[in-house]
Image (cartoon, grey):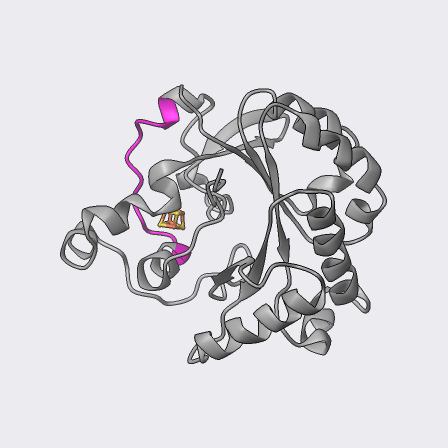
Amino acid sequence: MGVRQFSFTGGEPFVVRDIIRILEYALGLAPSLVLSNGTDPVLRRLEAIAVLAGRPHPLSFRISIDYADQARHDAGRGEGSWRKAWQCLAELHRRGFPVSIARQRDSGEDTAAVDLQYRELCLGHGLPGGTRIVSFPDFLTPGAHPDVPLVSEHCMTAHQTADSRSRFMCHFSKMVVKKNGRMRVYACTLVDDDESFDLGGRLDEAAGVRVMLRHHRCYSCFAHGSSCSEIHPG
Ligand code: SF4
């Protein structure tokens, strides 16, 4: 099917016992990206992860550091998480893996100032100042039903361009997930709490299904842009 990249997300992918074997296999086929919390499950398996650098395709990591402020990050993820996430980034970078950072975006924030704080933190932890930082709006918890405008076809044609539409995650990627013991394909990683975004049990068939943007997170994509499917720069 011409798949260009595999991305693995969770929860935390490294709590899966077979994740190293899975990545080993995937990296024989295409570049792969792991989205991780960057805590003990990664730190404990660093030596096994290092071996994956020798596979035919590159492996990259995106680690969540929600805020440039340690206390704020740890308040959401547990005491010590911030320090471990930076340690993971540094250890993975030291082993030659491209790394990026996922952060939360506050409404009304000074994005340039926040990104500068992250750059300084990167440099302080031995990472390149140009480390990619991907920011996400608050997507709310799964199953939430906030009152947001519906994204219609008119919204997508009048307020988006062909180029910006092509950057919607559901346009260029799909999420494959095992649910109740069956493989299902969802429009993207953000909508698997809504069965209407279940596009079936086959990737080739799901690729042709038209996605209606009725999920509240679709409005976040429309208004702010965001993607969990970062394509590997290599
Ligand atoms: S949340 Fe909606 S608009 Fe955004 S990528 Fe998923 S399906 Fe597409």
Task: Name which residue lies at 59% across and 70% down.
Answer: 118
* Residue farthest toward the right in the current orientation of the protein: 44
Task: Name which residue lies at 67% across and 47% down.
Answer: 11
Counting from the top left corner in percent of width and height, residue 141 is at 56, 60
Q: Residue 60 appears in which quarter of the rendering?
A: top right
Counting from the top left corner in percent of width and height, residue 38 is at 72, 53
Q: Quadrant of the N terminus?
A: top left
Left or right of residue 80: residue 212 = left
The rendered magenta stretch, by its main secondary structure, is classed as loop
> Is 164 situated above or below 26?
below
Left or right of residue 208: residue 89 = right
Between 186 and 96, the one lying in front of the other is 96
Between 39 and 75, the one lying in front of the other is 39
Task: Name which residue lies at 77% across and 41% down.
Answer: 15
Q: Is residue 88 visible?
A: yes
Left or right of residue 67: residue 149 = left
> Is 112 situated above or below 28?
below
In reply to whether residue 196 is colored magenta, the answer given is: no
Counting from the top left corner in percent of width and height, residue 186 is at 45, 36
Q: Is residue 38 visible?
A: no
Task: Name which residue lies at 61% across and 66% down.
Answer: 66
Counting from the top left corner in percent of width and height, residue 178 is at 60, 30
The magenta region covers 205-217
> Is 27 situated above or below 148?
above
Q: Residue 174 appears in which quarter of the rendering?
A: top left
